[in-house]
Image (cartoon, rainbow, N blue to C red):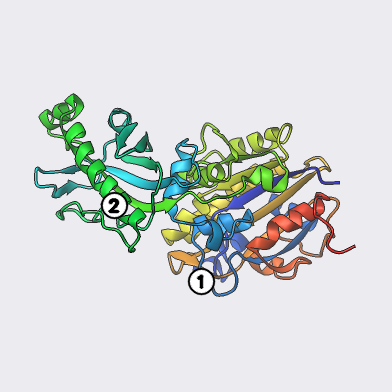
Amino acid sequence: MVQKTLCVIFDGLGDRPIPSLGGKTPLEAAATPNFDALAQKSLCGLMYTLGRGVRPGSDVSHLAIFGYPMQQYYTGRGPIEVAGLGIRLQEGDVAFRGNFATVDESWNILDRRAGRIRVVDAFAAALDGLVIDGVTCIVKPGTAHRAGVVLRGKGLSAAISDADPHEEGKPVAAVRPLDGTKEAAFTADVLNKFMRRSYEILDAMEENKQRGANGQFPANILLLRGAGVYPSMPEFDEKYELKSCCVAGGGLYKGIGAFLGMELIDVPGATALPDTDIEAKFKRGVELLSDHSFVFVHVKASDSLAEDGNAEGKKVFLEKADRAAALLRDLPDDVLLVIASDHSTACELKAHSADPVPVLFCNPSVRVDDVAAFGERACARGGLGVIEGKDIMPQIMNLMGKLHLIGA
Ligand code: ZN
């Protein structure tokens, strides 16, 4: 019986027929003997992650797959990204994504990324822990010019506008409340004070004087956007009575894992780029099954390559993924392998599309169907039929014998 689940999500895996690939999708055109062998001993199907006719974003589609409907749990990208930076959020926290940027004395934006600054740790540390009107401001560095900010205190709201005008040459925007509540007005006021205070601190820093002297853009302001409030929600492990972890290279996906309370595992070589070491991720994923009952492994580049319209690159990347998938062919009988995707990314659109994605469930306990290859059209004939993202966890729970009986 299934005791553990290894859930591999290939971002943007599904695609449309490509003329230059002989009318096949990149996954169909790729030589994937290992995926095909897995499909042959799996229950296969197609999945409309958020339902038919919905073009899913990566964040909300992952939440749907893990059983957290966006209507209830998605309040913006801020809390997810910030969770991935290692800030443990509390109910009522308001979280933002931010960029360290450069402004002149009149707060006109000279560079939205402070000259593509690579390390912002000192600047984030200088702002971390500021208290404004009883609200604590938590600031953590992200990759390159990025940072995450959390406002923690009583009476906060995420119904406020961005301070980031999203364009160079424009002045930093004054933060406005977006509804008539006193919480929104208070939060906007706190954030405007934070912007002022952070400019004063950053602009006076020796590191920035040094950058100016070297002809570099100083990181003298932190532009915030994407306010979201951390909702009241059960952690993944509590919801499903599992012990979970997350292996991902991309910040957003680490964020999804952390947002749901999964343990984040760093794997050297996991870059979220086409050069990523998929083999290292799969190997670590399998090892982690020794002390976890749910391991989520995310692979990003299938999506990014399709967003570049690079069908050949996506095909080649999937062939590389298939070579790594040799490690997944002979998992112990108590391990359920799920291979799925969050959405299709169509090379012809260079964007996410609403086309369904292939899914497989591999374990001796599943009712194996006649699907002989892992691809969009092959999986359309699978025994799983057509499912939605919200059906994945119940399917896993059923196989693990953990579903509660309805009725008597
Ligand atoms: Zn995605």
The amino acid type of the residue labelled 2 equals: Ala
Answer yes or no: do the residues labelled 2 and 1 have beta carbons within 8 Å? no
Q: Secondary structure at mark 2?
A: helix
Residue sticking out furthest to the top: 206
Residue 187, given in percent of the width and then of the height, sits at: 32, 50
Residue 184, given in percent of the width and then of the height, sits at: 34, 56
The amino acid type of the residue labelled 1 equals: Pro
Which labelled disc corresponds to residue 181?
A: none
Q: Residue visible at 60% across and 70% down?
A: 51
Q: Earlier in the sequence, mark 2 or mark 1?
A: 1
- Closest to the observer, 334 or 81: 81
Q: Secondary structure at mark 1?
A: helix
Quadrant hosting residue 369? bottom right
Q: Tell me: is circle 2 under 8 Å from ligand 1.
A: no
The residue labelled by disc 1 is 19
Q: Residue visible at 44% across and 55% down?
A: 76
Residue sticking out furthest to the front: 182
* Residue 374 visible in the displayed image: no
* Residue 75 visible in the displayed image: yes
- Closest to the observer, 108 or 211: 108
Q: Residues within 10 Å of mark 2 (few under 14, many from 20)?
A: many
Q: Is residue 261 left or right of residue 163?
A: right
User: Relative to residue 406, is residue 114 depicted above or below?
Assistant: above
Q: Nearer the viewer, mark 2 or mark 1?
A: 2
Residue 232, given in percent of the width and then of the height, sits at: 55, 50
Residue 216, given in percent of the width and then of the height, sits at: 16, 35
- Closest to the observer, 168 or 30: 168
The residue labelled by disc 2 is 188
Q: Rounded to the nearest whole Å, what is the CA distance between mark 2 and mark 1?
A: 52 Å
Q: Is residue 58 left or right of residue 203?
A: right
